[in-house]
Image (spheres, rainbow, N blue to C red):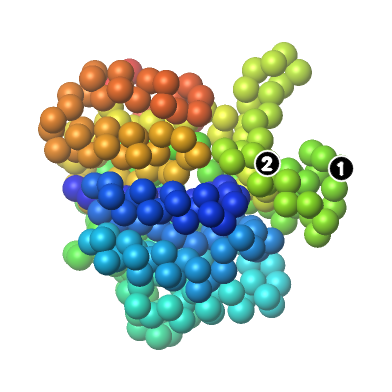
Amino acid sequence: MKLALGPLLYYWPRQQVIDFYEEIAKTPVDIAYLGETVCARRHELRVQDWAEIAAKLAAAGKQAILGTQTLIESESDLKTLRRVIDEKGFLTEANDMGAVRILAAEKRPFVAGPFLNVFNAATLSMMARLGASRWVMPVEMSAASLADLQAARPAGLETEVFAYGRLPLAFSARCFTARHFNLQKDDCQFKCLDFPDGLLIRTREGEEFLTLNGIQTQSSKVYNLIGEVDAMRALGVDVLRISPQSQHTIELLQAFHDRMHGTLDPSAARERLAGLGLAEPCNGFWYGKPGLDQIAA
């Protein structure tokens, strides 16, 4: 079982991003997903900058993968998509079917990202035929559904599970962070830079509800499957994905690494993660329950 750092879903200043990945190079992470996958207006780093970071991580022994934008809305988005795919020195994570089409036409292997909605064996087989070497389970999928797909999984196809972080739930053409400040999307003043872990939204009763991250809507709670590592291993999961956050990412990666390698038991692992997350944990989707639920393993 391998440990992966997912793409940075938030908008951070350029130097913060560079410093962050310099630290990631020293961690036990096996795979690092890079690139802007959320919003085309986030320009602190360009594709070439991400490729340079990828090269440094590859030199440190990591598998560096460049991800494509999830919601393609314009010709400029298509040009960026092509620039990402043209970085042929790195595997691509395809986050929309346009990227899949280009990669399949070029007969290049790719990672089928979590937003391609692979929920059944037929779709999984199609992705493998098109060239996917790994697929990332949709975050809403339960362990029972995953077991069914694993039983039908094509040979040579790796399975990756989103195991920690605020859940990316939906994308929209509208920027909800800009709307929160009564700004137009095209004149958002890059408000996402003010919220390195997203903008938490509460109900009128004060209960944490969702997190706004530009055009992406996330959960308010943090999905945490560190207690389910053994179950995922038993299902034949190959890779666990940890989503970056502005603080404690290094400690989170080390805790999952220790749990995966048996030097930390589930109870101690949960205790170590207490206080490191952005909010209370949840794992309901894994058990086929509402995502915000926390179910005892």
Kind of element beneath mark 2 = helix
Residue 26 sits above or below residue 83 on the image: above
| Marked residue nearer the N-terminal end (2 or 1) | 1
Of residues 289 and 134, the one nearer the viewer is 134
Of residues 103 and 198, the one nearer the viewer is 198
Of residues 135 and 196, the one nearer the viewer is 196
The percent coordinates of residue 66 (x first, y second) are 43, 66
Image point (31%, 40%), residue name: 253
Image point (23%, 39%), residue name: 257
The percent coordinates of residue 271 (x first, y second) are 30, 18
Image point (68%, 75%), residue name: 76
Q: Quadrant of the C terminus?
A: top left
Label 2, on which residue? 194
Residue 220 visible, this orientation: yes
Closer to viewer: mark 2 or mark 1: 2
The percent coordinates of residue 19 (x first, y second) are 45, 51
The percent coordinates of residue 133 (x first, y second) are 29, 67
Kind of element beneath mark 1 = loop
Residue type beneath disc 1 = Asn
Residue 128 sits above or below residue 6 on the image: below
Q: Find the residue positioned furthest to the left.
A: 262
Residue type beneath disc 2 = Asp
Instruction: Give neighbour class at mark 2: few <14, some 14-19, many 20+ (Cα, 10 Å).
Output: few
Image side of residue 206 versus residue 126, left or right: right
Residue 123 visible, this orientation: no
Image point (64%, 63%), residue name: 43
Of residues 63 and 283, the one nearer the viewer is 63
Residue 182: assigned label: 1
Q: Find the residue positioned furthest to the top.
A: 205
Image side of residue 191 versus residue 158, left or right: right
Instruction: Give neighbour class at mark 1: few <14, some 14-19, many 20+ (Cα, 10 Å).
Output: few
